[in-house]
């Protein structure tokens, strides 16, 4: 069973589910049949009782397909549990809410990003299960291929450290820049030792990279979830990342104190269900992502 709510700041507010098609109560006909009204009331009470008996697992997430996957997991989770999707609006709230115990798990980040948060906040978050690897790359409103790239181009990269390093490593893999030896996932623009194209690097919040594309920045790092807002897909990228080991797979994340609980184990089983895998396979056909787990039978 799945519920939805919205997290604002550090407060969890219960709201109606996004995208539902229920009629406005003010527009519903007012019944005059006493028996019919009594029947609806009894049915509602029965539903409420069932919900109250379930263990509610709150999962913080934001944006499709992550929120879609939380909903599918909620539909298939074993009896006795209800999954509540707690929707957030940025890349900070889901970790803060989990660290503070306002939610039980999150599904919105890869493990390097989580480890950065732990280091900065002395956190105890734990990556429980990789679910899918988003196909990221560089997009351009100017260049059709990597061979078209010109000297002096502006390059928009994420402003957070782990995704900044990820973007720079992709550029290095395509020999567009050379990074200092051994910098790995901690690479910054200061580690660029050779810049033959004389790129100008502009750090931008991950959620605003699509706007940089619209503003005409020559090369823009982005994820399929965000670039979709300007009607692009990974097939439109100038070049894509090759992440064979799922280092940046989107993870189901919990805390050290609850990672072994029955509720989190049930949640992990739902996230690795056939239904979730089939949904990911549909998206994989469009080149958006690759499943990062084997089906839990």
Image (tube, rainbow, N blue to C red):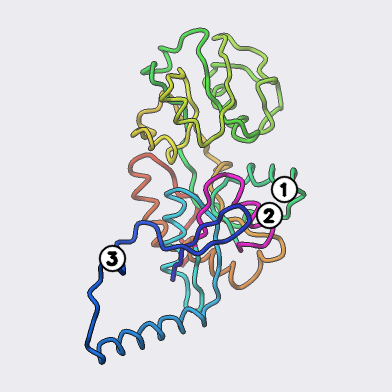
Identify the mark nearer the N-term, 2 or 3: 3
The image position of residue 249, as x and y in percent, is 54, 45
Does the stretch in magenta take in 89? yes
Secondary element at tag 3: loop
Query: Disc 2 marks which residue?
Result: 125
Secondary element at tag 2: strand
Identify the mark nearer the N-term, 3 or 1: 3
- 191 lies above or below 110: above
Residue located at (74% from left, 47% from top) = 121
- 17 lies above or below 45: above
The answer to whether mark 2 and mark 1 are in CB contact below 8 A is yes
**The N terminus appears in which quarter of the rendering?**
bottom left
Identify the mark nearer the N-term, 2 or 1: 1
Query: Disc 3 marks which residue?
Result: 23
Residue located at (41% from left, 21% from top) = 140
The image position of residue 205, as x and y in percent, is 56, 33
């Amino acid at each position: 069973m799945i519920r939805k709510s919205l997290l604002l700041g550090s407060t969890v507010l219960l709201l109606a589910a996004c995208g539902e098609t229920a009629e406005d109560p003010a527009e519903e006909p007012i019944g005059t049949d006493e028996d019919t009204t009594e029947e609806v009331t009894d049915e509602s009470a029965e539903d409420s009782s069932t919900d109250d008996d379930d263990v509610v697992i709150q999962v913080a997430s934001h944006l499709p397909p992550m929120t879609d996957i939380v909903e599918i997991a909620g539909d298939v989770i074993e009896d006795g549990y209800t999954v509540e999707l707690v929707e957030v609006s940025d890349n900070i709230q889901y970790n803060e809410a989990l660290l503070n115990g306002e939610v039980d798990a999150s599904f919105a980040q890869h493990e390097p990003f989580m480890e950065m948060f732990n280091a900065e906040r002395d956190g105890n978050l734990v990556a429980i299960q990789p679910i899918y690897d988003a196909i990221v790359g560089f997009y351009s409103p100017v260049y059709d291929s990597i061979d078209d790239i010109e000297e002096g181009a502006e390059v928009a990269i994420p402003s957070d450290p782990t995704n900044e390093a990820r973007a720079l490593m992709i550029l290095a893999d395509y020999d567009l820049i050379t990074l200092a030896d051994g910098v790995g996932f901690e690479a910054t623009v200061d580690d660029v030792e050779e810049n033959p194209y004389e790129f100008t690097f502009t750090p931008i919040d991950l959620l605003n990279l699509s706007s940089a594309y619209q503003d005409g920045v020559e090369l823009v790092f982005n994820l399929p979830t965000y670039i979709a807002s300007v009607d692009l897909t990974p097939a439109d990228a100038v070049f894509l990342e090759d992440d064979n080991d799922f280092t940046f797979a989107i993870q189901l994340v919990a805390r050290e104190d609850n990672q072994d609980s029955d509720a989190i184990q049930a949640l992990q089983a739902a996230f690795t269900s056939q239904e979730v895998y089939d949904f990911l396979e549909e998206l994989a056909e469009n080149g958006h992502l690759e499943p990062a787990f084997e089906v839990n039978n």
